[in-house]
Image: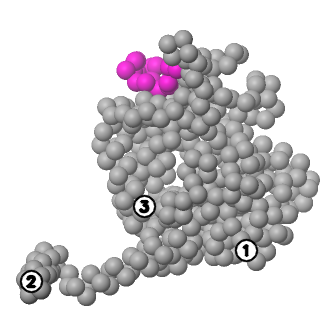
C-alpha cells in the first residue's frame, strides 16, 4: 500500500515538473515566498476605526513605515492582489460592456503622468462617483498592464470602512494590498484615517478620490436623492467635499490634479438609496445592489490638469503664514502632535473650499461637455442616469438626464 502511494507521488512529481518546469525545491521556495508575502500583508494591514475615526495611536502598523517604502513581502502581495483584481475587473466589467474614451489625447497624457513624473510629484485624479464598481471596476479597465505590473505606480484610494472594511483581518489585508485605505463616513476632514491617505500624496504617489463622497446616479455632479446641501448651501460651500482641497493644501510638493468624468456605470450597477416601487417607498442607508449587468456602454472624458491652486495657496500664506506640510516619515512615534497639526483652522477650511471649487469647476466643465456630446450625437440609446434616482430627487433640484 505504502509502495503504491510512494509510486503515485513520484509519478505526480515527475508530471508536474515536466509540465511546469519547476522542481519540488522551486515550488517549496515559491510557497515560502508567498507565505511571507501574506504574513506581511496581514502585519501591515489597514485597520478600520468605528469609534474615533483613526484618531488614536497604535491603530495600524502602516504608520510605522515611511510612506515611500514597503517591505518586500508587502510589495509582492500588492503585485499579486492588484494583478488578480485588475484582471478580474477587466473580465467582469470590460469584456461584458463597452468602455469608450472620448478624448484619446488627454487619456494618453494621464497614462503618461501615471508612468512617469518628476521625483516626489504626486498625481491626484478626481472623478464623479457613479457606482460602487467605479473603483476598482472602471479604473481597472482604463489601465494597461505595464502600469498594473508595477505596484509603486498603482493608484491609492479610500473606501468607506462601514462597507469595505469589516472587522475581518484577512479582508482588511486584501484591501490594503490593493492600495485601499479605510475612511470613516461622516468623520470629517480632520479624522486620523484621512491623514493616513494624505501620506500617500506626500510620498509622491498616485492617489484617486471621489470628491462627491458618495455614489450619485443622477448624472448631476453631487446631486442625488440623499443630498444634504440645498441650493443656498451649494452657493456657500460648493457641491463637493473639502477633503480634496485639504490634500492639495498640505502636500509638500504641489500635486498634478487630473479630472475625469464618466457616464454609463449607472446601468452596469444600478444603486438606489431612496426609491419607490409598486406604491411602496424603500430606503437604504448604504446601497441597494443588483446584479452587475452586461451589454452597456460606458464613456469617459479626461480633462487637462487643473490649474490655479498655487495662487490660492500663496494668497492664503501671505495672510496667515506658511501652511503645515505633511511628510512621509513614520507617524506612530509622533501621532499625538501630528493630530494637533492636522486639525483644520477656520482660515484653512476657507482655503480648502476655494481649492475644492477649482476641482468642482473642472468636473462640471467635463459634465457639460459630456452631455452636449451625447445630445449632439443623438445617442438616445446611452443610459447615463438611473431613472429611479432621478425620480427621487428632492424638490428644487432639476431632474434632467443627458
Q: Mark 1 to mark 3: distance in Å? A: 27 Å
Horizontal placement of 96 versus 234: left or right? left
Indicate whether 170 appears above or below 364.
below
- The structure residue drawn at horizontal position 58% and vertical position 57%, both measured from the top left corner, is 167
Residue occupying the far right of the picture: 319
Mark nearer the viewer, 2 or 3: 2
Q: Which mark is residue 341?
A: none
- The structure residue drawn at horizontal position 57% and vertical position 72%, both measured from the top left corner, is 44
Verify CB contact (< 8 Å) between mark 2 and mark 1.
no
Figure quadrant of the N terminus: bottom left
Q: Which mark is residue 1?
A: 2
Q: Where does residue 150 sit, x and y in percent of width and height? A: 43, 67
Classify 10 Å Cα crowding around label 1: few (below 14), some (14-19), many (20 and above): some
N-terminal of the two: label 1 or label 3? Answer: 3
In this view of the protein, which residue sits in the foreground, 282 or 240? Answer: 282
Return the residue at label 3. 82
N-terminal of the two: label 2 or label 3? Answer: 2
Classify 10 Å Cα crowding around label 2: few (below 14), some (14-19), many (20 and above): few
328 magenta-colored: no
| Quarter of image, res 119 | bottom right
Indicate whether 230 appears above or below 148.
above
Horizontal placement of 356 versus 262: left or right? right
Q: Where does residue 393 sit, x and y in percent of width and height? A: 63, 20
Return the residue at label 1. 332
Q: Which residues are magenta?
A: 372-388
User: Does residue 368 appear anywhere in the picture?
Assistant: no
User: Does residue 396 appear anywhere in the picture?
Assistant: yes
Horizontal placement of 73 versus 146: left or right? right
Amino acid at each position: 500500500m505504502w509502495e503504491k502511494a510512494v509510486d503515485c507521488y513520484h509519478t505526480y512529481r515527475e508530471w508536474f515538473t515536466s509540465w511546469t518546469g519547476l522542481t519540488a525545491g522551486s515550488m517549496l521556495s515559491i510557497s515560502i515566498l508567498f507565505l511571507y508575502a501574506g504574513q506581511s500583508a496581514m502585519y501591515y494591514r489597514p485597520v478600520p476605526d468605528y469609534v474615533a475615526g483613526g484618531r488614536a495611536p497604535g491603530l495600524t502598523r502602516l504608520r510605522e513605515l515611511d510612506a515611500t517604502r514597503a517591505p518586500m513581502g508587502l510589495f509582492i502581495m500588492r503585485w499579486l492582489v492588484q494583478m488578480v483584481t485588475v484582471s478580474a475587473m477587466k473580465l467582469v466589467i470590460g469584456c461584458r460592456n463597452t468602455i469608450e474614451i472620448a478624448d484619446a489625447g488627454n487619456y494618453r497624457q494621464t497614462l503618461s503622468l501615471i508612468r512617469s513624473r518628476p521625483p516626489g510629484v504626486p498625481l491626484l485624479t478626481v472623478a464623479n462617483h457613479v457606482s460602487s464598481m467605479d473603483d476598482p471596476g472602471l479604473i481597472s479597465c482604463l489601465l494597461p498592464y505595464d502600469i498594473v505590473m508595477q505596484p509603486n505606480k498603482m493608484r491609492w484610494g479610500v473606501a468607506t470602512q462601514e462597507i469595505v472594511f469589516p472587522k475581518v483581518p484577512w479582508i482588511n489585508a486584501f484591501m490594503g494590498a490593493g492600495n485601499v485605505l479605510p475612511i470613516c463616513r461622516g468623520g470629517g476632514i480632520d479624522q486620523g484615517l484621512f491623514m493616513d491617505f494624505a501620506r500617500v500624496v506626500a510620498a509622491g504617489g498616485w492617489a484617486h478620490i471621489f470628491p462627491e463622497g458618495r455614489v450619485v446616479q443622477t448624472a448631476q455632479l453631487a446631486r442625488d436623492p440623499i443630498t444634504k446641501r440645498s441650493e443656498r448651501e451649494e452657493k456657500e460651500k460648493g457641491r463637493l467635499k473639502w477633503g480634496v482641497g485639504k490634500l492639495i493644501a498640505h502636500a509638500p510638493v504641489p500635486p498634478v490634479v487630473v479630472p475625469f468624468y464618466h457616464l454609463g456605470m449607472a446601468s452596469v450597477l444600478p444603486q438606489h438609496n431612496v426609491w419607490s416601487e409598486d406604491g411602496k417607498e424603500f430606503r437604504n442607508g448604504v446601497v441597494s445592489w443588483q446584479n452587475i449587468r452586461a451589454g452597456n456602454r460606458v464613456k469617459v472624458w479626461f480633462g487637462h490638469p487643473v490649474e490655479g491652486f498655487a495662487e490660492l495657496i500663496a494668497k492664503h500664506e501671505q495672510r496667515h503664514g506658511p501652511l503645515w506640510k505633511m511628510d512621509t516619515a513614520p507617524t506612530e512615534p509622533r501621532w499625538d502632535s501630528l493630530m494637533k497639526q492636522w486639525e483644520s483652522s477656520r482660515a484653512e477650511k476657507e482655503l480648502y473650499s476655494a481649492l475644492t471649487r477649482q476641482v468642482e469647476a473642472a468636473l462640471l466643465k467635463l459634465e457639460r461637455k459630456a452631455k452636449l456630446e451625447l445630445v449632439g450625437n443623438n445617442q438616445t440609446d446611452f443610459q447615463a442616469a438611473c431613472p429611479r434616482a432621478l425620480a427621487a430627487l428632492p424638490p428644487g433640484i432639476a431632474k434632467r438626464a443627458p
